[in-house]
Image (cartoon, rainbow, N blue to C red):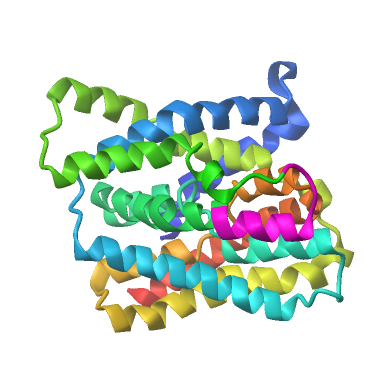
Amino acid sequence: MLQILLPMAALIIAGALWRPLRPLELDADGVRKSLTGLVYVLLLPALVLEVLWKAPIGIDSLRIILMASTAVVGSAVVASLIYRPKALPQQARGALLIAAAWPNATYLGLPVLEQTFGTEFRSVALQYDLLAATPLLLTIGILIAQQHGEGEKRHPLAELVRVPAFWAATAAITLNINQIPMPNGVGKTLELLGNSVPPLMLLALGMGLRWDLLHWRILPRLIPALLIQLMLMPLILYWASFGVGLEGDLRAAVVLEAAMPTMVLGMVICDRYHLDTALFAAATTLSTALSLITLPLWYGWLS
């Protein structure tokens, strides 16, 4: 696992170094927004369409969705019990609830599963994220943000239908279930676009890390969210997996998905609803750094 994570860590570090070095005078936030916009609108939907069109869709898909939903909701409930409403500002509480419950299942999870278990496990990461974690973020997560923050209030379902990858997943599953073959030219084009997603996502992830926001005084607030995200969430899913019949590499892959650090997309929610974005960014940064230690530990225990 360490050999797998080292190249990914190198890409994340390269992205993180962009902020202080500013190559070609290009601002890290501007480059990151351009990269993530390209991935979000074009490259990720292409990857989703290519992978889920060919992936086996069956009872294991339902198990993945159920386990992902259990992990996210369970973690959100635990976090809400730990972070009591009157114990800290509303904006900080909302940011920490989202940071504790939603993992970076695609941006980091997809390349980790692909390199650890093989390309066929990319579908596990995409099903975990696009069919469970992201819909929950854009429904329950937005409700949490609306309750704790300010800003424009849209219906959660209106947010979900604005996600290009969601429609790509819907189209791919429809084509898959109806056994419509993928034309060779379409497959090669989608594969070409999709292959660029993991390195660009890892670079963008590094660019989004904010080491300047880490201070000792905020650690007491961050520690519960980090423990829930990196330890409790995968533990919940591991024990729950026995009840639904997940076994072998599939169980290990799903547990590793739950063990991923905080989901970067949550930053968009925090910005939109004026939550404590700095606190969320600190949680993302620290959880990503710690995951380079905890992920090999989880993989070693599961192997």
Q: Is residue 135 magenta?
A: no
Does residue 89 lie above or below 191 as drawn?
Answer: below
Q: How many marks?
A: 0
Closest to the observer, 60 or 107:
60
Residue 189 position, x and y percent, is 27, 22
Residue 72 position, x and y percent, is 52, 67
- The answer to which quarter of the image holds residue 60 is bottom left
Q: Which quadrant is the C terminus positioned in? A: bottom left
Residue 243 position, x and y percent, is 31, 83
Closest to the observer, 267 or 179:
179
Task: Report whether residue 129 is seen.
Answer: yes
Q: Is residue 140 magenta?
A: yes
Residue, x 40% and y 73% (percent of image)? Answer: 300
Residue 67 horizontal side relative to residue 138, left or right: left
Secondary structure of the magenta portion, mostly? helix
Residue range corresponding to the magenta coloring: 139-152
Residue, x 18% and y 43% (percent of image)? Answer: 176
Residue 72 horizontal side relative to residue 21, left or right: left
Residue 98 horizontal side relative to residue 282, left or right: left
**Residue closest to the far top:** 24
Does residue 139 lie above or below 251 as drawn?
Answer: above
Does residue 288 lie above or below 153 as drawn?
Answer: below
